[in-house]
Image (cartoon, rainbow, N blue to C red):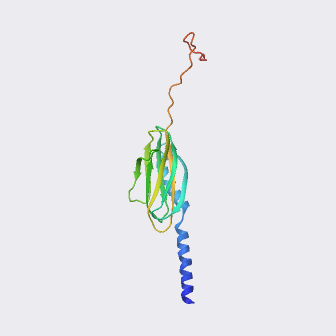
Amino acid sequence: MIKRLTITLMSLVAMAVTAQAQDPAKATDDAYSMGVYYSARGFSVLPSIDGVDGTGSKISFLIPVTKGIDYVFLAGRDTYMRDLDIYVYDESNALLIKDRRSTSRAGVRFRSSYTGTVKVILHVARANGLGAWSVIVGRRGAVTTPNEVKPVNPNSGSPAIEDPK
């Protein structure tokens, strides 16, 4: 009877410790604190993608990109995440950039050379049990459009639409 009670109490303590390990709000705050640096440099930081996972988990998501625009992907964590890695792949599955440093946070920055999508993979390299992560996306730059071409009147070679200047 005492053995069963001890096991029950130990199970409750283990569940309480696991519940404390999952702190998505702290992970989001951590990601946005990283984003402050990039916001001050003209990046627009977009809402986060969050989750709770353990060691070895790989989370992937697709992000639309535009040629000539700078992007940052920043991964924040709670206290139970020990090492996060980020990989960014293009549409042909070629690795564009990665962050495999053995730090608890991860972040990459690149300029897109095409318009399409990239696949971002967040890898939880090390965690103490379950931990929370949060990824934010920042973007900077404007798409430059080519000079406007005005239609020409085929009979005279002059502009078909007069400028009201």
Name the residue nearer the viewer: 102 or 94.
Answer: 94
Above/below status of 146 relative to 164: below
Q: Quadrant of the N terminus?
A: bottom right
Residue 29: x percent and y percent? Answer: 53, 57
Above/below status of 81 relative to 146: below
Residue at image location 54% in from the left, 54% down from the top: 49
Q: Quadrant of the C terminus?
A: top right
In the picture as drawn, the residue positioned furthest to the bottom comes out as 1
Residue at image location 50% in from the left, 46% down from the top: 138
Residue at image location 43% in from the left, 44% down from the top: 110
Above/below status of 50 relative to 109: below
Residue 139: x percent and y percent? Answer: 50, 44
In the picture as drawn, the residue positioned furthest to the left comes out as 101
In the picture as drawn, the residue positioned furthest to the front comes out as 92
Name the residue nearer the viewer: 135 or 38.
Answer: 135
Image-quadrant location for residue 83 = bottom left
Residue 10: x percent and y percent? Answer: 53, 80
Name the residue nearer the viewer: 163 or 148.
Answer: 148
In the picture as drawn, the residue positioned furthest to the top comes out as 156
**How many callouts does the rendering have?**
0
Along the horizontal axis of the image, is 132 left or right of 104? right
Along the horizontal axis of the image, is 159 left or right of 109? right
Residue 149: x percent and y percent? Answer: 53, 22
